């Protein structure tokens, strides 16, 4: 997530807005003075029309500035969240290792959220190895396509080293995997999450640090090839229950384990389909099953701050 520095952004914004409003205000003032001086025989209607247009343009400029102010505040909030999260976990991660496994839907509906995820993975893979004694990352990307008929693209959990220790090779490996991800259609989230659980268990016997699994997607385990597109089938509900039970068991089996569930779908309402409502509830229940309901969010744009906050489960 790339954020402009607050001082530079504020300076540009203020100078730009001052210039716009000063110019528009002077123009409107001059038009009003001119109207009071002209003779009635001159084309007053045309001048009044220009004045009304100028007022409308000034109103549009004001609206644009207000929207820019809103975007600037959002950027400031995100920067503050990331800064605070880094400060909160710095002492904790210096004394233990971290393992993060990302389970991500790479189907066609995930374009915007994937952009946030890719930037997050690149950022933490570059920063955390510098402050943690051991940082490991794994990725399970899921979406069925002609090139990936089983629906899973897996980057096995492995240590990422600071660039000065391995010449940037481990960082280049995870970046290359992200760059080459193949997008697909149906999203088998249940199989992907079970793969992530198995991956973490394989390293648990030797890795003693904190383990976090982060799920990012917009549909629950309801995309069977022969299933209904609007409602959840009975066997899909059964697969959902089994997965939630396994998540609960995984968290309870060992200390320092956490789940982060990021739902990137459209907000649900009374007009949403049954499958859309079920998908929202599934992502919320993933965090609940881990007994960490606070680790559910619908804002992938705050992924980095959210991840840094939740990645270390205090003893």
Image (spheres, helix red, strand yellow):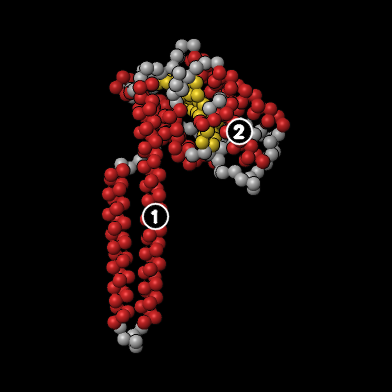
- Nearest to viewer (mark 1 / mark 2): 1
Q: Classify residue 165 as left or right of residue 121.
A: left
Q: Residue furthest front?
A: 315
**Mark 1 or mark 2, which has the lower sequence index?**
1
Question: Which quadrant of the view contains residue 131?
Answer: top left
Q: Classify residue 276 as left or right of residue 153.
A: right
22 or 109, which lies in front?
A: 22
Looking at the picture, how far across and down is residue 159, in whole percent? 41, 19
Instruction: Tell me which residue sits at (40%, 48%) in the image.
Output: 71
Which residue matches tag 2? 282
Instruction: Tell me which residue sits at (37%, 51%) in the image.
Output: 69
Q: Secondary structure at mark 1?
A: helix
Q: Residue furthest right?
A: 234
Question: Which quadrant of the view contains residue 55?
Answer: bottom left
Residue 299, compared with residue 200, is above or below; it is below
Instruction: Tell me which residue sits at (29%, 53%) in the image.
Output: 14
Q: Secondary structure at mark 2?
A: helix
Q: Residue furthest top?
A: 205
Residue 234, compared with residue 6, is above or below; it is above
Question: Which quadrant of the view contains residue 136?
Answer: top left
Looking at the picture, how far across and down is residue 1, in whole percent? 39, 37
Q: Are marks 1 and 2 in contact (CB under 8 Å)?
A: no
Instruction: Tell me which residue sits at (32%, 75%) in the image.
Output: 32
Regarding residue 34, the answer to whether it shows in the image is yes
63 or 101, which lies in front?
A: 63
The residues tagged by marks 1 and 2 sit, at their Cα atoms, a distance apart of: 37 Å
Looking at the picture, how far across and down is residue 184, in whole percent? 55, 36
Looking at the rendered image, the quarter that the C terminus falls into is top left
């Amino acid at each position: 997530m790339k954020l402009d520095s607050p001082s530079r952004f504020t300076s540009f914004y203020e100078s730009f807005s001052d210039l716009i409003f000063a110019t528009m205000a002077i123009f409107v003032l001059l038009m009003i003075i001119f109207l009071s001086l002209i003779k009635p025989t001159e084309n007053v209607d045309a001048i009044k029309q220009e004045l009304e247009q100028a007022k409308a343009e000034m109103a549009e400029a004001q609206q644009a500035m207000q929207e820019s102010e809103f975007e600037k505040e959002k950027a400031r909030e995100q920067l503050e969240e990331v800064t605070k999260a880094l400060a909160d976990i710095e002492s904790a991660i210096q004394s233990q290792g971290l393992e993060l496994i990302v389970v991500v839907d790479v189907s066609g509906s995930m374009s915007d959220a994937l952009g946030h995820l890719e930037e997050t993975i690149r950022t933490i893979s570059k920063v955390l190895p510098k402050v943690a004694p051991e940082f490991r990352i794994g990725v399970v990307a899921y979406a069925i396509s002609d090139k990936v008929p089983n629906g899973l693209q897996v980057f096995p959990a492995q240590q990422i080293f600071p660039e000065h220790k391995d010449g940037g090779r481990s960082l280049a490996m995870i970046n290359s995997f992200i760059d080459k991800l193949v997008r697909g259609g149906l999203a088998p989230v249940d199989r992907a999450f079970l793969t992530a659980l198995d991956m973490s268990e394989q390293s648990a016997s030797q890795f003693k640090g904190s383990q976090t699994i982060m799920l990012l997607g917009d549909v629950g385990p309801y995309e069977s090839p022969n299933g209904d597109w609007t409602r959840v089938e009975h066997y899909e509900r059964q697969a959902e229950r089994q997965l939630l039970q396994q998540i609960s068991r995984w968290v309870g089996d060992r200390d320092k384990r956490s789940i982060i569930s990021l739902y990137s779908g459209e907000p649900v309402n009374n007009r949403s389909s049954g499958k859309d409502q079920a998908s929202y509830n599934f992502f919320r229940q993933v965090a609940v099953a881990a007994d960490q309901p606070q680790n559910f969010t619908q804002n992938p744009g705050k992924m980095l701050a959210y991840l840094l906050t939740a990645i270390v489960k205090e003893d």
